[in-house]
Amino acid sequence: MIGSARTIGAFLWNTLRGQHALLLTIAAAIALSLFFVPRGAELGRLNLELGFTHKALTILEEKYAAGDSSAATIGALAQARAQVGNVSGAALLLEQLLNDHPRDPELLQALAGYYRQLGRLESSLRMVERLGTIQPSPASLQELARLYGELNRPIEQRRVLRQLVSRPRPDASHFVELAKLEKATGNPAAGIEMIRRLETLRPGAVDASVVALDMSLRVAAGQVGSAFEHAGRWLARSRNPARDVLPVASAFSVSGHPKLALKLLAPLADKSREPSLVMATGQAEVDAGQREAALRRLEAFFAGTNGNAHPDVAQLRLRLAISMGLHGRASDAAAAMGIGSIPEGVLAATSAAALRAGRSDVVDSIRARLRDERNTLPPIIMAETSSALRDRQAATEWAGLAARDAKGNPETAIKLARLELSLLHRNLALAALRSGLPFTFQDGQRPAFAGNADIPENLLDPIARLYADLGLPNEGQAVLDILKDKQPSLQADQAWAIAAASARRQDAVIDWLKTNDDRRIGPDFLKDLVFTALKGGSQGLALAAAARLVEDRGTDSDRMLLAEVKVLFGAPLVRLKPTEALASADPLDRTATR
């Protein structure tokens, strides 16, 4: 019994002893697990890695506020701030680490990215430049080239792109960008060489856009003939010439050679029903002075589609017929495309054409559209169209409503001023024009600039001419004086010249013509300047502009205009040689005596 008791006792002791050991093991494990459970900043970083950004942000902000300024905590906190949209706060944090870690690639890369998001391109550039010296890579060079481009620093951008194309396995896009840059910096021959290298290294990357760039480079280098021949050979090998000809021909059009573009386009367009090709060909014909041929092409294309031509083709047909003063054909175009499809901007011109053509069907349909869309069409469109339809009362009423839209809106203000002037409401026209300009006006005082927004360049010339028509050339010249300084451009200079000529400041405009001798001034503008000077009685300016026109372009029409201006102001009439006679009667040409 005693032996049995001992045996049981030993068993119980051993059991309890084993349980005690197990309990000790469990206790030790619990202690260790508590030691390894993430706490504080570690917990914040873990939540960030798991995607619990807001929870991580709360923990990390608390640790940072409590004085934890370790690189790991600051880096994680910056990442969390950026992820919730506080990019500026993220950048501020990382800037604290920059002094202690000026050569850390990850830090520089993160800061560069944050600065770019904030629009601080100069700061981003400094980080990328530093990164490029520490850890140069294709990615850092690409970002460097991109930043130089966005900051308009072409010399540095070109240097980096040259590095990129010299690396092993260069990207095709770098050759293209460098070629464009070489042209922009006045070295098209170097750009042509880049395209040659690309053809050698990556022939498969040479598509129609690259060929178009090549053509523009050759034209810029004076190699017009070889450019045209090369374009023809490449298109002959193209699998889809009707598609590829568009960018290639465009390179000639924008370079001032629409006739060459037409030679590439016309043979393909004559056999194609592709709207984009017909559109491009028609536009090339317009640019080449063959407007009648362009209109016939568009009309024939439209007829071949049973009235289902592409809307862009229909609109070009309508606009072209209106611009040519062909009222009947414009009315046909309007009826064919459907009055409801006529763009708002040409609704008034279409109405005028239909009235002159005696097309009551088109006129009635336009009137019906005005009734149906009176709540959706802008008041200025309603006013212009009503005026074109000779409904003076409706035009006046709608003009009053349009005055609200003209405030701070120069485009609407100019349209409204022109409309009010046609209705013989001179004071309302002036008020409308002034309301759309960023100036304050007080009688007897020079206009004061009172805004930051630029006026679109295409509106500057209409502003100058409106002031002349309103009989306020001095105010117009003062406004354009300021705009020329506030938003310098060729368009601003030319608008100022028209305004100054209208104000009879011919000496200033003559000096401007002499200083701008880089041939940027277009011949059409010079011709307009001649007639503006004649209207204002500025003999010297008319002669200077006509002489500049002959010097820059020198067509028979230009020389005839100069001769007429001289005769008009007392020079003896000199009979032109047969070769100097006016070769053609261009409908756009106007003589000084007209």
Image (cartoon, helix red, strand yellow):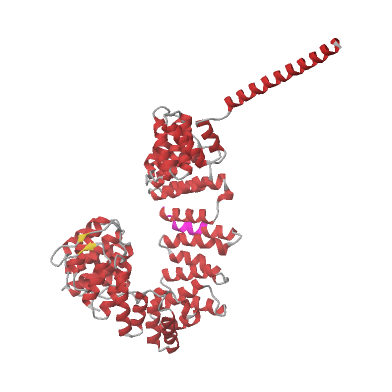
Determine the residue positioned at 44% across, 58% down. Answer: 224
The answer to whether 476 is drawn above or below residue 399 in the figure is above
Question: Which quarter of the figure has residue 420?
Answer: bottom left
Q: Residue at the far right: name it.
A: 1
Task: Residue 26 in the image: state x and y as whole percent.
Answer: 67, 23
**Residue 98 appears in view:** yes
**Residue found 49% across the figure and 80% down from its top:** 338
Q: Is residue 171 left or right of residue 458?
A: right
Quarter location, residue 457: bottom left
Above-or-below relation of 291 to 66: below
Give the farthest residue toward the top.
2
Q: Which residues are magenta?
A: 221-230
Q: Position of residue 477 (x, y in %)?
A: 20, 64
Does the magenta run of residues contain 125?
A: no
Residue nearest the viewer, comparing 503 with 22: 22
Residue located at (51% from left, 65% from top)? 264
Q: Is residue 562 visible?
A: no
Magenta region, main secondary structure: helix
Q: Residue pushed farthest front?
A: 1
